[in-house]
Image (spheres, grey):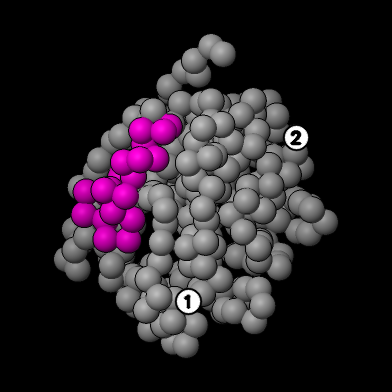
Amino acid sequence: MELIVQGRKAYAYTGGKPFDASLPCVIFLHGAMNDHSVWNLLARWFAHHGHAVLAVDQPAHGRSEGPAAASVESLADWALALLDAAGVQRAAVVGHSMGTLIGLEMAARAPDRITQLAMIGTAYPMKVSDALLGTAREQPLRAIDLVNSLSHASIATKPSFPGPGMWVHGGARALMRRVLAGGSGLEGRNLFEHDFRLCDAYANGLQAAAEVRCPVTLVLGARDQMTSPKATRELATALRAQILTLPAGHSLMTEVPDGVLNAVRQALARAQEPA
């Protein structure tokens, strides 16, 4: 589904069902160097089980027009504007990696609009090493291979997603290369460096957490080398979050798809406490 958000075209995958804003809505927010396709399985399940689904391409990613956003905070404003464009007043938010920071800001800026927040593969602060930022700037294809290797718990990933004949690492690399080729960052940066600098620069997490009113669930990979579970402790405490840990690395949606689906179903079933 195409929408006009802040004057530019934005794309949202609706899970194979016509979008119906009268249904309970879930907005899915991808991480750095990804697009809506990382949510295909989850989006289809929720769309076929009574939800309105918006799995978005963020600005300058996938099928959404640029320019890329200048900050995590501006991406949160964009996502809230997308809900407006879709005719949605209240929604649950599911984010992965950088998308979790966007979701956190959404829940802080519009606490009356966000019903639940699921943060998959998150950390705060989400710092990125100078070495990786430099490689992203100078050799983005090499940086893609490095991040891809760190994002999966094992080279010998069992052939469970989405079926025999699929190559988890190769699929992730192809997606990141496609996003890199199709997008542009700000101030002359390529999109890889741009996305990672947004994660590295975000410093409002604890202040945002103090404004969140909805139930929050952290879905973490026990072997995550990109966003270590240890880096969530202060944020989890501030959010009074439920924590679910799965046997995976950073790419949880591909490594343990059934586990992530069950975790998100549990997260979205949590009732909002009375004010």
Highlighted range, magenta: 220-239
Name which residue lies at 31% across and 41% down.
233
Q: Is residue 119 magenta?
A: no
Q: Quadrant of the C terminus?
A: top right
Instruction: Give the x, y percent position of residue 180.
Output: 53, 76
The crowd level at tag 1 (other Cα within 10 Å; few <14, some 14-19, many 20+) is some
> Looking at the picture, which amino acid does disc 2 mark?
Gly
Instruction: Give the x, y percent position of residue 264.
Output: 40, 35
Q: Is residue 182 visible?
A: no
> Looking at the picture, which amino acid does disc 1 mark?
Arg
In the rendered view, does 116 fall on the left or right side of 82? left
Q: Is residue 231 magenta?
A: yes
Q: Quadrant of residue 251?
A: bottom left
Identify the disc placed on residue 177.
1
Q: Is residue 134 visible?
A: yes
Q: Which callout, 1 or 2, points at the residue further toward the start of the chain? A: 2
Instruction: Give the x, y percent position of residue 167.
Output: 30, 68
Q: Which residue is mark 2?
A: 87
Q: Nearer the viewer, residue 245 or 138?
A: 138
In the rendered view, does 103 fall on the left or right side of 136? right
The crowd level at tag 2 (other Cα within 10 Å; few <14, some 14-19, many 20+) is few
Q: Is residue 273 above or below residue 107?
A: above
Instruction: Give the x, y percent position of residue 28.
Output: 53, 45
